[in-house]
Amino acid sequence: MSKAIRIHQTGGPEVLSWEDIEVGDPGPGQVRLQQSACGLNYIDVYGRSGMYPVGDLPAVIGMEASGVVESLGEGVDGLVIGDRVAYPMTLGAYAEVRLIDADKLVKIPDSISDETAAAMMLKGLTAHYLLFRTYPVQAGDSILVYAAAGGVGLLLCQWANRLGANVIGCVGSEEKARLAKENGCHHTILYREEDIPARVREITAGVGVAVAYDSIGQATFEKSLDSLRPFGVLATYGAASGPVEPFSPQILAGKGSLYVTRPTLATHISTRALLEEGAQRLFEAVESGQVKVSVNQTLPLADCAEAHRQLEARETTGSTILKI
């Protein structure tokens, strides 16, 4: 027997249950993974609350973890027992031991710890596709990053700074503003106190930003549009305040022939080639020191409910890991 966090119904953090599960032997193409640490991500909240489907209940949730290969199923190539590996975007991460398809895993470089790997895969690969695929940031671009002191936000700010962008970050407090600035953000906007589009225009001498990376969703959609320069891109990649309401594309014309996209990490790692390309670039950025992964909260996996509460209350900064 092994332990895992499961939900028997959707709802608040209280539905997360630490309980015994049975884990069998790996089937063809699978490995049995002894996990070390799990990452905490807002997509876990979406699954727990019922916003995103998680399949039949009860279900083990969680989408990111690191660990050590314990045994191999038939036909697995490129991995051996004892390999340190990590993965993003594969439901069932909140567990001590699990089965997982081998092609979802990437090997962790020796210089990166299991804890750092668990904190960086989903968030780091999200930052990668946003900066290099959704809108390829160029030196001199002004960009707007929401939740700039969060897990994805801190990585976006650092990486975009290294690319030569003028980074503007939205944060909820002076403490988070300081943290964002320590991680590559040039300007911060306190969204509770300041008019976001007005401050963006002030910072950019009236031009606006090339791209807004918006993980908040419904509450900031129009503010993001109004912050863009002509031909600007709104990448709405999360929904912390709820999903964006339906809108007429006609509004994009009068605001400057704008573009709106709703990218997902699942699409950007949907093939082995895409996963490997993103992971290689991410590992190189971390190993070279261009990007530092900030693990600012660590809790036992058994205390997952408290971790969810902190995340939803916006009490966290950087990444949170759940230790096993």
Image (spheres, rainbow, N blue to C red):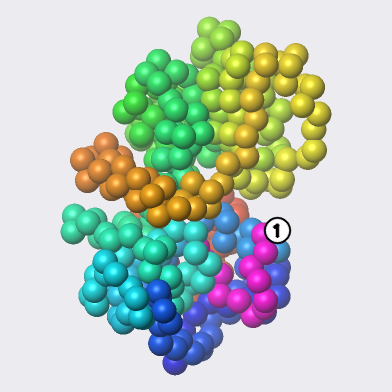
The quarter of the picture where the N terminus appears is bottom left
| The residue positioned farthest toward the top in the image shown | 205
Q: In the image, residue 315 lies at what x, y percent?
A: 53, 51
Horizontal relation, residue 126 to residue 229: left or right: left
Q: Label 1 is placed on what type of residue?
A: Met
In this rendering, would 184 be left or right of 55? left
Q: Main secondary structure of the magenta part?
A: loop
Q: Residue at x 22, y 46 (%)?
A: 287
Name the one closer to the observer, 253 or 59. 253
Give the image location of residue 309, x and y in percent.
58, 61
Residue that label 1 marks = 51
Say if 30 sits above or below 291 in the image: below
Q: Start and end of the magenta stretch?
A: 52-63
Q: Residue at x 53, y 48 (%)?
A: 267
Residue 285 lies left or right of residue 62; in this view the side is left
Q: Is residue 207 left or right of residue 116?
A: right
The image shows a total of numbered marks equal to: 1
Quadrant location of the C terminus in the rendered image: bottom left
Q: Residue at x 41, y 63 (%)?
A: 104
Tell whether position 56 is magenta.
yes
> Residue 43 location, x and y as percent?
57, 56
Label 1: which secondary element: loop
What residue sits 58% from the left and 25% below the top? 233
125 shown above or below 188: below
Residue 108 quadrant: bottom left
* In the image, farthest residue toward the front: 75
Crowding at mark 1 (Cα within 10 Å: few <14, some 14-19, many 20+): some
Q: Position of residue 96 (x, y in %)?
A: 41, 79
**Residue 188 or residue 41, whichever sits in front:** 41
